Image: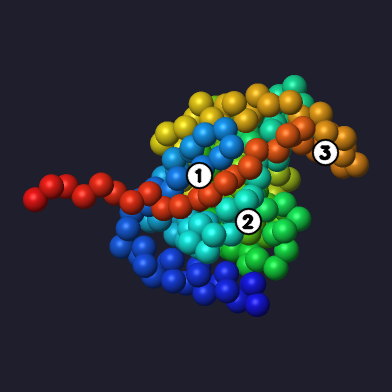
Amino acid sequence: MRKSAALLLWFVSACAFADAEKVEIIMSTAQGDIVIELDMRGAPITAANFLSLVDGGHLDGAMFYRTVYPENDNGTPPISVIQGGLGDASEGFQTVAHETTDKTGILHKDGSISMARGGPGTASTEFFICIGDQPALDFGGNRNTDQLGFAAFGRVVDGMDVVRAIHNSPSNTPVDDDYLKGQILENPVLIERVTRKIPLQSSP
């Protein structure tokens, strides 16, 4: 049922914003607001999927739970990002086709938002925000052995101070996965609510 509902919301969002180039959302967290601009034209599949999660209220109560920087990164080459989403509650949500950066033109620059994934086409609810430029995450980069990169679909337009505060939070929670050691936040940051930002109407 949840997967069907998510698919319907994705379809509605994709249709509703077929003519929109950019859609801004407000991600209200326990540490402050992050305003994110989704690139509906550049990454239509990925952006529409994320917007369906917003419209459905699925990200309300999600968490930022992971911070990665060169000193604690267990991958190669090292990167700097924060990761959030539904974690274990992501099961049952639809996965989306992988939109590579060479097709979208949306690179992993400072403030870019992108989908976390395992194999290509497995992204669903988990996402990350870049701190600094991260070319290793683009198509052809060496972060993944498949060199297909990750699917960036927008950027932070306000609230990078909040992103950096989360990035600098303590992250020594013990985990069994060696790859994630030193990266899980001691106090995950609650994503209280995510909503579309309504543009101000100009006076007649």
Where disc 1 sits, the SS reads strand
Tell me the mark number nearer the camera, choosing from 2 and 1: 1
Residue 112 on image: x %, y % = 50, 39
Separation of residues labelled 3 and 1 (CA atoms): 28 Å
Q: Amino acid at mark 3?
A: Tyr
Q: Which residue is mark 2?
A: 125
Q: What's the coloring here? A: rainbow
Q: How many marks?
A: 3
Q: Which residue is mark 1?
A: 27
Q: Residue furthest top?
A: 71
In the picture, which quadrant includes the N terminus?
Answer: bottom right
Mark earlier in primary sequence (3, 1): 1
Q: Amino acid at mark 2?
A: Thr
Which residue is found at the position 57% from the left and 46% from the top? 192
Up the image or down, 38 lies above or below 4; here it is above
Quarter holding residue 93? bottom right
For the residue carrying disc 3, how many other residues have a C-alpha within 10 Å: few (<14), some (14-19), or many (20+)? few
Residue 144 on image: x %, y % = 70, 44
Q: Which residue is mark 3?
A: 179
Please say if the residues under marks 3 and 2 sit with CB atoms less than 8 Å apart: no
126 or 33: which is nearer to us?
33
Which residue is found at the position 74% from the left and 26% from the top? 170
Mark earlier in primary sequence (3, 2): 2
Separation of residues labelled 2 and 1 (CA atoms): 15 Å
Tell me the mark number nearer the camera, choosing from 3 and 1: 1
119 or 31: which is nearer to us?
31
